[in-house]
DNA sequence: CTATATAAAGTGC
DNA sequence: GCACTTTATATAG
Protein backbone atom coordinates (compact mmCIF):
# COMPACT_ATOMS: atom_id res chain seq x y z
CA UNK A 1 0.00 0.00 0.00
CA UNK A 2 1.28 3.46 -0.89
CA UNK A 3 -0.19 6.60 0.62
CA UNK A 4 0.53 10.03 -0.85
CA UNK A 5 -0.32 13.27 0.89
CA UNK A 6 -0.10 16.95 0.23
CA UNK A 7 -0.32 19.89 2.62
CA UNK A 8 -4.08 19.57 2.52
CA UNK A 9 -4.49 15.87 3.00
CA UNK A 10 -4.34 12.50 1.33
CA UNK A 11 -4.18 12.82 -2.42
CA UNK A 12 -3.74 9.21 -3.45
CA UNK A 13 -3.85 5.68 -2.14
CA UNK A 14 -2.33 3.08 -4.38
CA UNK A 15 -2.72 -0.67 -4.07
CA UNK A 16 -0.24 -3.12 -5.47
CA UNK A 17 2.12 -5.97 -4.82
CA UNK A 18 5.44 -4.29 -5.54
CA UNK A 19 6.76 -1.06 -4.08
CA UNK A 20 8.50 -0.18 -7.31
CA UNK A 21 5.27 -0.46 -9.28
CA UNK A 22 3.46 1.76 -6.80
CA UNK A 23 6.16 4.40 -6.88
CA UNK A 24 6.05 4.38 -10.68
CA UNK A 25 2.30 4.91 -10.61
CA UNK A 26 2.64 7.70 -8.10
CA UNK A 27 5.18 9.51 -10.23
CA UNK A 28 2.93 9.04 -13.23
CA UNK A 29 0.13 10.84 -11.39
CA UNK A 30 2.28 13.49 -9.73
CA UNK A 31 5.42 14.39 -11.58
CA UNK A 32 6.88 16.15 -8.56
CA UNK A 33 6.15 13.38 -6.12
CA UNK A 34 8.84 12.55 -3.61
CA UNK A 35 9.21 9.30 -1.78
CA UNK A 36 10.10 9.66 1.84
CA UNK A 37 10.01 7.36 4.86
CA UNK A 38 6.67 7.41 6.60
CA UNK A 39 6.66 10.41 8.92
CA UNK A 40 4.35 10.69 11.91
CA UNK A 41 1.30 12.20 10.14
CA UNK A 42 1.77 9.81 7.27
CA UNK A 43 1.88 6.80 9.54
CA UNK A 44 -1.52 7.79 10.91
CA UNK A 45 -2.92 7.94 7.42
CA UNK A 46 -1.43 4.60 6.49
CA UNK A 47 -2.77 2.98 9.63
CA UNK A 48 -6.26 4.14 8.74
CA UNK A 49 -5.92 2.82 5.22
CA UNK A 50 -4.69 -0.51 6.46
CA UNK A 51 -7.64 -0.73 8.84
CA UNK A 52 -9.99 -0.21 5.94
CA UNK A 53 -8.24 -2.82 3.86
CA UNK A 54 -8.39 -5.14 6.82
CA UNK A 55 -12.16 -4.93 6.82
CA UNK A 56 -12.80 -2.54 9.68
CA UNK A 57 -14.54 -0.28 7.20
CA UNK A 58 -14.79 2.60 9.62
CA UNK A 59 -14.50 6.23 8.64
CA UNK A 60 -10.83 7.07 9.01
CA UNK A 61 -11.57 10.76 9.43
CA UNK A 62 -8.58 11.66 7.35
CA UNK A 63 -8.39 14.94 5.48
CA UNK A 64 -8.63 14.09 1.81
CA UNK A 65 -7.27 16.33 -0.90
CA UNK A 66 -9.39 15.06 -3.72
CA UNK A 67 -8.63 16.52 -7.11
CA UNK A 68 -11.09 15.91 -9.88
CA UNK A 69 -14.03 17.30 -11.76
CA UNK A 70 -17.06 18.56 -9.88
CA UNK A 71 -18.87 15.45 -10.98
CA UNK A 72 -16.20 13.19 -9.57
CA UNK A 73 -15.97 15.01 -6.27
CA UNK A 74 -19.72 14.80 -5.81
CA UNK A 75 -19.62 11.08 -6.44
CA UNK A 76 -16.69 10.46 -4.08
CA UNK A 77 -18.46 12.36 -1.34
CA UNK A 78 -21.50 10.20 -1.92
CA UNK A 79 -19.45 7.02 -1.81
CA UNK A 80 -18.25 8.03 1.64
CA UNK A 81 -21.80 7.69 2.94
CA UNK A 82 -22.11 4.02 2.02
CA UNK A 83 -22.21 1.93 5.19
CA UNK A 84 -19.69 -0.88 5.48
CA UNK A 85 -21.04 -4.28 4.59
CA UNK A 86 -23.55 -2.89 2.14
CA UNK A 87 -23.41 -2.29 -1.57
CA UNK A 88 -25.09 0.10 -3.93
CA UNK A 89 -25.53 -0.06 -7.67
CA UNK A 90 -24.08 2.34 -10.16
CA UNK A 91 -27.63 3.20 -11.11
CA UNK A 92 -28.56 4.08 -7.56
CA UNK A 93 -25.57 6.38 -7.26
CA UNK A 94 -26.45 7.97 -10.57
CA UNK A 95 -29.98 8.57 -9.35
CA UNK A 96 -28.69 10.26 -6.21
CA UNK A 97 -26.60 12.52 -8.41
CA UNK A 98 -29.72 13.47 -10.36
CA UNK A 99 -28.60 11.40 -13.32
CA UNK A 100 -30.91 8.38 -13.38
CA UNK A 101 -29.44 7.18 -16.64
CA UNK A 102 -25.84 8.09 -15.91
CA UNK A 103 -24.71 4.80 -14.44
CA UNK A 104 -21.79 4.52 -16.80
CA UNK A 105 -20.60 7.98 -15.93
CA UNK A 106 -20.64 6.95 -12.29
CA UNK A 107 -18.52 3.94 -13.11
CA UNK A 108 -16.08 6.08 -15.03
CA UNK A 109 -15.78 8.46 -12.10
CA UNK A 110 -15.22 5.55 -9.74
CA UNK A 111 -12.44 4.32 -11.95
CA UNK A 112 -10.84 7.73 -11.59
CA UNK A 113 -10.97 7.53 -7.81
CA UNK A 114 -7.44 8.25 -6.58
CA UNK A 115 -7.81 7.16 -2.98
CA UNK A 116 -8.64 3.46 -3.13
CA UNK A 117 -10.26 2.21 0.07
CA UNK A 118 -10.85 5.61 1.66
CA UNK A 119 -13.48 6.22 -0.96
CA UNK A 120 -15.20 2.84 -0.91
CA UNK A 121 -15.65 2.33 -4.60
CA UNK A 122 -15.46 -1.41 -3.91
CA UNK A 123 -18.99 -1.22 -2.47
CA UNK A 124 -20.37 -0.28 -5.84
CA UNK A 125 -21.83 -3.14 -7.85
CA UNK A 126 -24.06 -3.70 -10.81
CA UNK A 127 -27.80 -3.28 -10.59
CA UNK A 128 -28.24 -7.07 -10.58
CA UNK A 129 -25.90 -7.37 -7.61
CA UNK A 130 -23.01 -8.87 -9.56
CA UNK A 131 -19.54 -7.42 -9.39
CA UNK A 132 -18.50 -5.42 -12.38
CA UNK A 133 -14.92 -4.26 -12.15
CA UNK A 134 -12.38 -2.69 -9.91
CA UNK A 135 -9.53 -0.34 -10.61
CA UNK A 136 -7.12 -2.37 -8.51
CA UNK A 137 -8.31 -5.79 -9.61
CA UNK A 138 -11.54 -7.68 -9.17
CA UNK A 139 -9.96 -10.03 -6.66
CA UNK A 140 -9.22 -7.14 -4.32
CA UNK A 141 -12.82 -5.98 -4.61
CA UNK A 142 -14.15 -9.42 -3.82
CA UNK A 143 -11.84 -9.72 -0.81
CA UNK A 144 -12.79 -6.33 0.58
CA UNK A 145 -16.50 -7.03 0.25
CA UNK A 146 -16.16 -10.45 1.83
CA UNK A 147 -14.37 -8.99 4.84
CA UNK A 148 -16.89 -6.21 5.30
CA UNK A 149 -19.79 -8.62 5.04
CA UNK A 150 -18.06 -10.79 7.58
CA UNK A 151 -17.84 -7.84 9.94
CA UNK A 152 -21.53 -6.93 9.55
C1' DC B 1 -24.14 -14.11 -24.43
C1' DT B 2 -25.01 -10.52 -28.11
C1' DA B 3 -26.95 -6.21 -29.62
C1' DT B 4 -28.62 -1.78 -28.66
C1' DA B 5 -29.54 2.58 -25.95
C1' DT B 6 -27.49 5.75 -23.22
C1' DA B 7 -24.61 9.46 -20.48
C1' DA B 8 -20.37 11.29 -19.29
C1' DA B 9 -15.28 11.53 -19.52
C1' DG B 10 -10.97 11.44 -22.38
C1' DT B 11 -8.58 12.70 -26.42
C1' DG B 12 -7.11 15.30 -30.50
C1' DC B 13 -7.88 19.22 -33.24
C1' DG C 1 -15.58 24.19 -28.04
C1' DC C 2 -16.60 20.20 -30.99
C1' DA C 3 -16.62 15.56 -32.87
C1' DC C 4 -15.13 10.98 -32.02
C1' DT C 5 -13.86 7.10 -29.11
C1' DT C 6 -14.05 4.52 -24.86
C1' DT C 7 -16.35 2.80 -20.77
C1' DA C 8 -16.03 -0.73 -13.66
C1' DT C 9 -23.74 -0.12 -17.23
C1' DA C 10 -28.75 -1.32 -18.17
C1' DT C 11 -32.02 -3.63 -20.66
C1' DA C 12 -34.22 -6.74 -24.18
C1' DG C 13 -33.96 -10.98 -26.77
Image (cartoon, coloured by chain):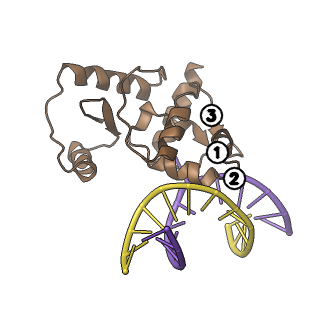
Chain colours: A brown, B yellow, C purple
Q: Which residue position holds label 3?
A: A87
Q: Residue at x 54, y 40 (%)?
A: A75
Front tag of 3 and 1: 1
Are dots 1 and 2 in contact, CB under 8 Å?
yes
Tell me the number on the disc at residue A13.
none
Q: Residue at left 58%, top 29%?
A: A82
Circle 1 residue: A94
**Which of these two is toward me, A115 or A122?**
A115
Residue shown at 30% from the left, 43% from the top: A17
Query: Residue A66, how many percent across, how many down?
Result: 38, 37
Figure check: A95 above or below A64: below
- Residue matched to label 2: A101
- Of the residues under marks 3 and 1, which one precedes in the sequence? 3
Which residue is found at the position 64% from the left and 45% from the top? A94
Q: Image check: A152 left or right of A95? A: left
**Residue sitting nearer the eye, A46 or B13:** B13
Same chain? Circles 1 and 2: yes
How packed mark 3 is, by other alpha carbons closer than 10 Å (few <14, some 14-19, many 20 or more), is some
Label 3: element kind: loop
- Asked whether the residues under marks 3 and 1 belong to the same chain, the reply is yes
Eye-nearest disc, 2 or 3: 2
Q: Secondary structure at mark 2?
A: loop
Amino acid sequence: VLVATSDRGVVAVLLGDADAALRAELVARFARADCMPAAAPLRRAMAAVVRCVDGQGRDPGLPLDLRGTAFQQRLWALLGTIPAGTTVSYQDLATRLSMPAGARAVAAACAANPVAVLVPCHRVVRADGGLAGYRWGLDRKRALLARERGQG
